[in-house]
Image (cartoon, rainbow, N blue to C red):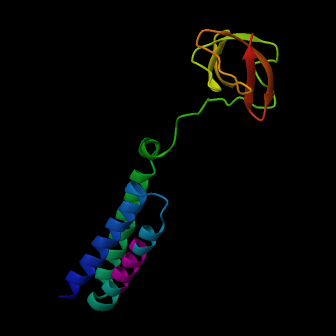
Amino acid sequence: MPWLTIAMLLLFGLLFVAAEVIFIPGTTVVGVVGFVLLVIGVWMGYRDLGTPVGHYALAGVVVLAGLIVYVGLRPKNLARVALTSVNTAAVKDVRWPDVAPGTVGRTLSALRPSGTALFGAERREVVTRGEFVATGSQVRVLGIEHNRIIVAAA
């Protein structure tokens, strides 16, 4: 019956190594547990079943673990779990506003006191100093304060 214990240790060790390399890379806990199971299984193979069986177990573990690592670390397999897309989005820097003071635009929504205005082809969230402005009215940019575009009816 010791051969069954050794076989189960080696099987579960290889399964844990495969899970680490192929399915959940980067966790290291699963891989370390798998490696420890493999070492214990090979050691028990030498101890309980003799040197020749221990050599076969060691050679089998080395070949199978090497094959698992090779298959798991191929570029095609790595591409499935790696981030390959490039983010090309940009964020407007508040230190350089794209709507200069004095620019005239048209409101797309009623400003009560905040809403949306159109400056050229750009939609911007704007705010008034407290007055209400109807939809479709002309507004002029008074200034920019703390990331807010301050407008007044033109």
Residue 1: in magenta span: no
**Front-most of 84 and 119?**
119
Counting every numbered tag in the picture gives: 0
| Quarter location, residue 42 | bottom left
Please state the horizontal and vertical placement of residue 51, each as a whole percent of the image: 33, 86
Q: Residue furthest left?
A: 1
- Residue 28, x across and y down, in percent: 48, 66
Q: Is residue 89 above or below residue 140?
A: below
- Quarter-of-image position of residue 60: bottom left
Report the magenta stretch's main SS.
helix
Q: Which residues are magenta?
A: 34-43
Rendered view: 54 above or below 138: below
Q: Residue at x 28, y 71 (%)?
A: 11
In the rendered image, residue 31, in percent from the top left (x then y), is placed at 43, 68
Indicate the quadrant containing the C terminus: top left, top right, bottom left or bottom right.
top right
Residue farthest along the front direction in this orientation:
131
Q: Residue 31 versus residue 118: which sits nearer the camera?
A: 118
Quadrant including the N terminus:
bottom left
The residue sitting at 36% across, 67% down in the picture is 16
Closer-to-camera residue (85/58): 85
Does 56 sit left or right of 128 as displayed?
left
Q: Quadrant of residue 147?
A: top right
Residue 141, compared with residue 66, is above or below; it is above
Spot occupied by residue 142 in the image (x, y as percentages of width and height): 81, 20
Taking the magenta stretch, the answer to whether it contains residue 40 is: yes
